Structure formats: structure tokens, C-alpha cells
Image (tube, coloured by chain):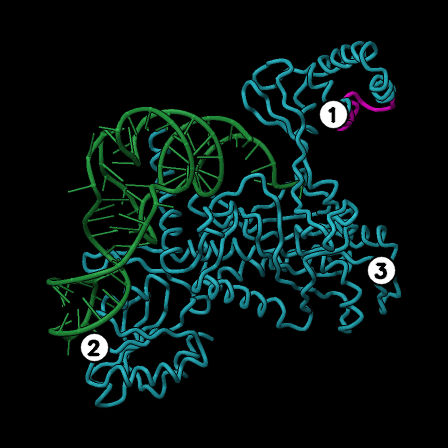
Amino acid sequence: MRLVIAQKNNKQNDVIEKIVSLSKRKGFVFQSSEIYNGLNGCWDYGPLGVELLKNLKEEWWKFMTYREDVEGLDAAILMHPRVWEASGHVENFTDPMIDCKQCKARFRLDTLGEQVAEKKKEKLLKTLSAKLEETDKEKFVVLQAIIDSEATLEEKFEKLLETDEIAVALLEEMNCPQCGTKASFTEPKNFNLMFKTFLGPVEKTENAIYLRPETAQGIFVNFLNVLNSSRQKLPFGIAQIGKAFRNEINTKNFLFRTREFEQMEMQYFVKPADDKKHYDNWKAARLEWYKSLGMSEDKLRYHDHPADKLAHYAKEATDIEYLFPFGWGEIEGIHNRTDFDLSRHEEYSTKSQKYFDEESKEKFIPYIIETSAGASRGFMAFLVNAYNEEEVNGEQRVVLKFHPRLAPIKAAILPLVKKDGMPEVAREIESKLRPYMKVFYDDKGAIGRRYRRMDEVGTPYCITVDTQTLEDGTVTVRERDSMEQIRIKKEDLLHHLIEKLA
RNA sequence: GCGAGAGUAGCUCAGUGGUAGAGCACUACCUUGCCAAGGUAGCUGUCGCGGGUUCAAGUCCCGUCUCUCGCUCCA
């Protein structure tokens, strides 16, 4: 059984490895700073990758903003530090962690108490209290204040672990929940997932500023600006595509978990009473979008968050997940963020974020339905989904079956042979198509090889100039997936392709 | 951060202390007339990096960096 799983895992990893290799070979994705041994968790998009990514973002932008009720925005990556206090990131985006030196297990400090029995906790507090009374009067006072406070044992324990000067002393008395070894914990380490930098050239603490860990806050703080400048009324949305940064402890799985990534977010502002309706609408619409661009239906699913696992701001939440070779992974989240964000910004900025509804003559803070898609993750999902190995006449063919609108190159123009005036005719066709779409000209080697090369980068159409072209002005158009050819007049090519790409 | 594995040509990999290799890819020419055909020639390397052992290191030892997997993390 174990062997079967191992083999299965190897096979799954093979697919990712093949895609990573293909990505480098054909210019989709390169490792960042590769000549300097690479930079962990950062990737560069090559000539074909940037086309695919751009097409993906463009499809999203058209779908989300080419409508009456959604406006676009491009907020700065750097924002006022208070934004991240209001959003909860300063408080929640950091987790003190400890390792057991004996068994190497890692624990989150704030949840360590959950793994200790009630009686054990009482005993620990007594031992610690007695010890500190003799050794460290200052800490003893702090400890005693917490012990005497009106709180459950559980809460007191958590509080002690959160109090830096006490935590270390307490940890020395505790046993590792996993292996039972006493006093084997490392000092608590702070994992702050936000990238910190400095505003201005002087590296002073008070100049510290963060690279945004999500694009959403740029939308929230511009809610009133957009509302007042666009003449929108509820319900309406604000959409934004942009980079975000998270200092992940571990990066993983190619583009799936990276430290620098791109988000495509739309925040839809609604009347609180309508939140359920809009949440359901967007949830359905977003899944349909992936399907409409050719993502396999059986590799897509919702993962609804159970009520007890919801983030601090959410009332309802679901992930759209794609079945990657390494398992199901989130590519988009749809959340009902309630009035949490705008209320917090009202509180922290002291600027009213209320909306006045003309019909009901009511003033209130709108609810927000968020659709938050990962551009980098979507890129990878579409790439993995497109990857196919097929057998054609006993030979293996690798083909990326991108939706034509996503394909980096839309059409290749190929003279059947490099003589008899065919290259000249092909060049003419190329120059007529090039202003309208990304095309590729190739006259090198055998025609079959050129078709396969185009299959490997997902080019949906190959236009071939042959002897008959010289006689009657028609060319063949070969379709990537079926490999079937039709013959059309070269004058009709542009119209034909534009129709196919519409 | 811990544990395990890996790093040799653009890609995939062989090379078990004694001259740096193969296939594919790429470039040019010839041939070729619709699905990875053939021929000829050519290009490609601080064997991840640094140190050590040795007459001699891609190979053995130590360190380090990067990648992959697992743990952990992923409000």
C-alpha cells in the first residue's frame, strides 16, 4: 500500500517536473536570479509566460469590469502603516512559534495551552509562581497579576504564553506535548508574514512600512473616492490586479506558494440585507469563469469554510479549488467580509465610511463580498490543465491545450518548404496578421516538426502555405487539438482567426 | 526552522579516484512537399559554490547555497 502511494506521488511529481522543465525550455517561467543560484520562492515569467499571464489578467479584467456596476482601480503597493493595524494584519499575521529540540516538532505558542490538561496547568502555575518568587520578583508580580485576574484557566495560560518575559520561564517548566521531554523548547521565534521596508532612505524604526500582503485594503481605503467620483450606487464593485507579498515560512509547489504573487480582486459593496444574494451570485459566476476558459469541470470544486474555521473578518467563505498533481489547491476565495473592513477603517482613520441610501433614507456601512483570485495560481492551474501527452501514429506528442484566448501565440505561419516563393507569401500573411495578434513565423525544418513545436507551446492555429497557395491563393489552417486542416482563402484569414479568438 | 533526497551542456540524464560523456534541443548547409524523416558540419561545461584528503577529486570528507519531498506554516 505504502509503495503504491509512493509510486503515485512520484508520478504526480513527474508531471510538475515536466511542466517546470517545459516552462524553462520554452520560456514560460524561469527561476528568479537563476545565475546567482536562484531566490527561494520567486519566479520570473519568460516571453511566453508573460503572454499567458497577460491574457489571463485581461480575460479577468474584461469579465469583471466591462460591466456597469464595477469600476477599476490600481492602488499603490505601499500604504500607510495604520492600514495594516486596521485590517488586523499587524495583530494576526504574526505567529510566535517554538520547536522541541528533542523531537523537532513545531508548535504555535498561542495554541500550546490547548494541548495541556487542566490539572497540569494548575500545577505548572504553582511551580512557576514558587520559582519566580525566589528568583525574579519583577516577573513574579506580572505572573501573579495574571493568575489573580478574572479569567478561565485556559485564558490565563494563553495570556502567560503571550507575555514575552513570562513565556520563556513557563516553557522551561513544560513538557513537549509530542515527546514529553521537559524544558526542550527553543526560544519563541516571531514569524511576521508581512514584508517590512523603510519609507525614505533613512532606516529608522518609525519609517518602517509594509509591502501589502493583499490588494484588498487598497480598495477599501478608496471606497469613498471611487463612490464619489464614479456616480455609482450600491450595489457596485471595485476591481484591482496587483502584486502582493507574504513572507511565507516555506514556499512550495512551483508557482503555488510564492513570496511575491499577483492577485486579481474585486470587492463588491452591498446593502447588508442583500449579502447572501450577492455572495451566491459571485460564487457561481466565478466558477463559471474558469470553466468558460477551458478548465476541466471535474478538476474544479468549492471548498466551503465551516463556520468555526472562518477568518476574523468573514461571515461566509468558500474557496474555488483546482486539482493539481499534488492535490486540491485554492485558486480563488469568495468571502462575505461583512462591514468589518470599512468599520475598522472608520475607527482607525476616524473618517466616516457610511453610505447614504436615497431610497430608504438610511445611513449605513456597506457589506463587502470579496472575490480574490490568485493570478499566479490561476496561471499554474491553466498551465497544468492544458498539459497533455498523447500518442499520434505511435509517436508521443506533448500539447498544451490552452483556450485560444489564453494561448501565448495565436497562430504560426509556416511555408511548407523553404523555396518556390512560399516563404515570401508566408511573410506577407504574417505581416497582415501581426498587428492584430501574437503570431510566429517559422520556415526551419520539416513541417511535422514545426507543428509539434507549436503544439508544445499551445499555439491553437497553424497556417501553412503550400503549392496550392501559389496556384489559387488558399492556405491550410490546422487546428491544434484535432490536428485537422481546413483550406481557406488567405484574404479571409484575419476574419477567420478573429472570429475564433472572440 | 527541522528531517530526507538532489544539483554534471539549453532540457533529460550517464559517469563508483586516473583524458568531461550520451540523447534530445539549438545554428548552418544539403535533402525534404502535411504531422517530432535523413545526412554533414558546428555551438554548448569553473561537474552549484568554498575548503580539505590525495601524485590525482565530478567521484571521498567538511562547510555553504539552491531545488524537491515530508513536518511546520498558509489570519
Q: Characterize the local packing of mark 1: few (<14), some (14-19) or many (20 or more) Cα atoms within 10 angstroms.
A: many
Q: Characterize the local packing of mark 3: few (<14), some (14-19) or many (20 or more) Cα atoms within 10 angstroms.
A: some
Residue A484 % position (x, y): 27, 71
Task: Identify the colour of chain A in the image.
Answer: cyan
Q: Which mark is residue A161?
A: 1
Q: Nearer the viewer, residue A297 or A492?
A: A492
Task: Choose top left, top right, bottom left or bottom right for residue A270.
Answer: bottom right
C-alpha span from label 3 to label 2: 69 Å
- Rendered view: A141 above or below A419: above
Q: Is residue A180 left or right of residue A35?
A: right
Residue A402 % position (x, y): 41, 63
- Which residue position is annotated with label 3? A354
Q: Which mark is residue A353?
A: none
Q: Label the green chain with its letter.
A: B
- Chain letter for mark 2: A
- Which residue position is annotated with label 2? A417
